[in-house]
Every structure is written in structure tokens, then in C-alpha cells.
Image (cartoon, rainbow, N blue to C red):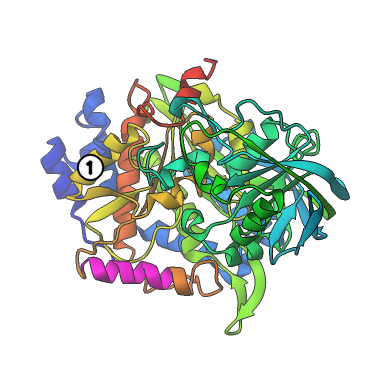
Amino acid sequence: MFETLNLTTMLKAITGCSLLAVIVLGGCTSVQEKRLSATDSLLLAIDGQAYNQHLAVLSHDSLEGRKPFTDGETKTITYLSTEFAKLGLSPGNGDSYFQEVPLVEIDSKADGLLLRGPGQSLTLNYLDDFVAGSRRIQAEARVQDSEIVFVGYGIVAPEFGWDDYAGVDVSGKTVVVLVNDPGFADSTLFKGRNMTYYGRWTYKYEEASRQGAAAVLIVHDTAPASYGWNVVRSSWGKSKLYLRTTDNNQSRPLAEGWITMEAAQQLVALAGVSPDVLKQAGQKGFRPVPLDVTASVTIRNTITQSVSHNVLALWEGTDRKDEYLIYTAHWDHFGIGEAIDGDSIYNGAADNATGTAALLEIAKAFTQAPARPLRSILFLAVTSEEQGLLGSEYYATHPVYPVSRTVAAVNIDVLQPFGRMKDIIVVGKGQSELDEYIDDAAQKQDRYTRAEPDPSAGFYFRSDHFNFAKVGIPALYTETGTISREHGEAWGEAQKKAYNENRYHAPSDNYSPDWDLSGSIEDLRLLFDIGYTLGNEARFPKWKSGSEFKGIREQTPQE
């Protein structure tokens, strides 16, 4: 399953001293020689045996699908903390391996959305025409006769010279916004088809909240959203987990939701406005359009409050131990749910037992390296990624270690067992100088990096690294490549397609002892290489010019 490596021979050739001398007798005693290159340390420590064992445990039925608030959570975080302790890593949160993450589960149900225009009205049907919920921790949220303003893409982006809220006060009003950003329709704007965070639906709600809107509705359109209305309907038709803030989420709009494109066109017609207004929103200089229509909707919430946990373990550095590199992966999955072909346990073996096991494997490599890194390495297994990146959001907004002293974050989410690949995909390639680190590490393996195939889908904003980017920390997220060394690219693409269609978020995402983990091990070595390099430097990698996160980093107060 794994490639055979003659470690003694390889290290002897590279370092000029025997493996035994390095490990036992302390031969080659200079600091540089003690601190072997990252690749050598990988060869020493990352052989896949422990990784395979962790995978089998973390995806076993006894963990009940690793859902937050269940016995599966307790078993999972206990296993992780125990294994980190065995490796000699210190508790990462004072004297504890855990960080409590306060969450609230809200099951929102909405009445029809009533739109009143000049002389006539229209009622949109819940789930068919619109979806809406409220993050506010209260039994009922009511929007009553709220004036509707179309604010284009709902974006305020000074670096792109764009402000969709310019000249209008939307306090207490309902804003309607388009999904994605102007670059999707006009490649000369923003970053063209490469979606920025301003195009992500989560940003739309955050900006509307900052503007004081009472409600915000995103217009769904399949191409720029990259998924159909059925995905929106399915997600919003059931309870959702949110972070619980000190003000019980009262700073959020009363209602957040989506409307179909057909419903948006009916709204524009009701207002007596040209349907071209939806296209005009993508032109520079667009200004908000009051629609002379009001919105009314009542949302009833069923609320359950609880606490989940992030797991933190620290490998303390030496000379620069007050600077931190973070490796992160989400430990959670969907627990026990609807049975498919007789299986109701959503084990999430690929998603993300692979990434969680990777934290333990990379941690082991650091502990077995001949010298500690200069910087401290934090291993962070986060909760509730599947519920909206909540565990990583909580850590990023309630950091145990200062954001200004956090060098970078490396996120591991789904290492596919497809064997060795010639390529590795960098999601969000072009965002930061971390590109150069992974390019160098890949080259050592006779591999190369590629950007994700469809940057317009905004995958950079869909996993835990993104929450670190939001607070200015350069963040790296890789995806398994597609060009198989043994079978070629068409085969690799077929494997991914089969996973996405048959196993992704399904009970069939199960571990198999027959998995070919050789490619996963190669990726782990690469990610360790990057971290070992960063851990022994004095410089901080930067965001590249044009990144929407560059200004955040530059404005972060030094602590």
C-alpha cells in the first residue's frame, strides 16, 4: 500500500551521517544538521502506519458519525486529546486540550413572504419561492411592512472602488442582493470569474447586518451560485447551528434568506421597475434602487442551546515560541441520519477522518524531528464545519494565541485515497505567498500545483481555512490532485466524480483497509514540509496584491 523507503540509506546520503548517529548518538551536531530538512523528517516519521490506524478508529461506527452534542463527539474529542497527549504535545488552551464553542440550534419556519406594491400585492410561498430564517435567539422574528431596496450585489469593496450601499440608509429596511460578485458577468471587474469573498452568500448577510438592514434576501441564480435551488431549499428547510454571541445574535438582521430568480423578477415587476435593473447591478457606478414595495414575514424559531468543543494541542517552539503556525482540520460529520441501503451512520471517513488523522500524523512527525522548530505549532481540530465552519469561526474570533503572531494556517479537509498524483490543487491559488511554499514542496516530490478547476464557485470560502483568512491570517487549503501517476487524468477525475455523486455526505463514505493511501501520505509529507519550513523562519508570509484579505492583515494591531 505504501512505497518502501530505505530511510537509513537516504538520510546517510543527504546528511553525511548515519540514522543511528542522528537519533541516538547525536552525530552531526551543528544546529543546521540537527534541524534536518523537512523532507528528511517526513521520511523519518510519516510512513502511514499510524495514519491508517487513526483513520480506522475515527471512521468506526462506534463514534456514531462524529456529530456535535452526541456521544460521538465525546468519544472523538477524548480520542484526539489522548493521542495528542501520548505524543507529548501540551494542552493548547491553558491546562486544557479543549475550547468550548457555544452553539445554538435554531429550527426556523416562516409564513408566506408578503410583498405589497403600488395598488397590488404578491405572496411568495415558503420553500418554493423563498427561504428565510433568523439567527436571533428569540421565539419569533417579525418583519412588518419593511421597505425593500435593491442594492445590487450588496458589496462594499474599497479596493475595487465598489460600494452598492452608497447614498442610501437601509436601517430597518429589507435589502435584496444578487449572488456572487460583478466579476462573474464582467471579467474586467473584481477578479473576473475567480470569486472573491464579496461574492459569497455569507458576506452578503454580514454586510447587510453592518448596514443595519432588518432583512436580507439573496437572489438565487444557478450559474453564479454554482448550485441549484434544490440545494438552498434542502439546507434551509431544516434546523441550523449557529454560534451563540453574548447579545444572543441580536446584531444580526431579523431575517436572512433567499428568493428564486423568478420571484425576484416578479418583485421587480410589482415595483414597476425595468427588469434590466438586475443586469445594471453589474455595471460600475450602479446605485441602490428603492423599489416602492414593502416586505412582511413572520419567522418562528424552535431553539436549543448547547456547547461543542474544539481540540487544541501545542508543540512549543524554541527561539520564536511566541509565534504560531496552525494546522487545522474539522473532526465533525453528520452523525446518524436517514438510512441509505440499510446504513444510517454517516461516518465521514474521507470527510474528514482523513484530515483529522492527518493532524495526529503531522504532529508525530514534529515530535520525532531531531530538533524542535523555532516557532510553536498548534494542532487545531475544530467542530461544526459541516454546520457552517462554526468551530473555526469561533477560534478565529476568540483566539487562544494572538492573531498578529499567527504566521499562517494550513487546513486539511478530505485526503482522497486515490493513490499518487502528479499534481496537487491549491484552492484559492494566487491569494498569498503560501503559493511559493507549496510550489517548492511539490517540486521536491516531482509534482506541480494547480488552481481549482472552477474558481467561480468560491471553494476558497467553503472550508475552515477561510475563517483564518477573514481575520487576516494567510491560509492554505489543498485538494487532492486529479492526474494519477498510474492511471492518468481521466481516471482521477472519474474517481472524484464518483465520490461526489455516491459518497459525499452519505453513509457510504466509509473507511476501507484496501484504500490506496500512498497519495495521501505524499500529500501529508508535502504539508509537513511547508509547516516545517514556516516553523523555522523569521518572516511572515504575506497576502498578495489584490487579495481582499491583505488590508485586514495590515490593519491587525500588533500584540
361 left or right, relative to 113: left
Q: Nearer the viewer, residue 525 or 319?
A: 525
| Relative height, residue 32 to residue 305 (above, below) | above
Residue of label 1: 20
232 left or right, relative to 371: right
Residue 186, horizontal then vertical, whole percent: 39, 43
Q: Which residues are magenta?
A: 488-499
Residue 290, horizontal then vertical, whole percent: 69, 38
Residue 261, horizontal then vertical, whole percent: 59, 58
Quarter of the rendering occupied by the N terminus = bottom left
Question: Residue at point 80% right, 55% down?
Answer: 120
Question: Residue at point 46% right, 53% down?
Answer: 413
Is residue 86 magenta-colored? no
Question: Which image quarter: residue 152?
Answer: top right
Q: Nearer the viewer, residue 483 or 98?
A: 483
Question: Residue at point 50% right, 67% down?
Answer: 504
Dominant secondary-structure state across the stretch colored magenta:
helix
175 left or right, relative to 503: right
Q: Amino acid at mark 1?
A: Leu
Residue at the far right: name it: 139
Is residue 495 magenta-colored? yes
Residue at the far top: name it: 558
From this viewpoint, is residue 323 visible?
no
Question: Residue at point 27% right, 38% down?
Answer: 38
Question: Which image quarter: residue 129?
Answer: bottom right
Q: Nearer the viewer, residue 201 or 481?
A: 201
Local packing at callout 1 (Cα closer than 10 Å; few below 14, some 14-19, many 20+) is few
| Relative height, residue 10 to residue 492 (above, below) | above
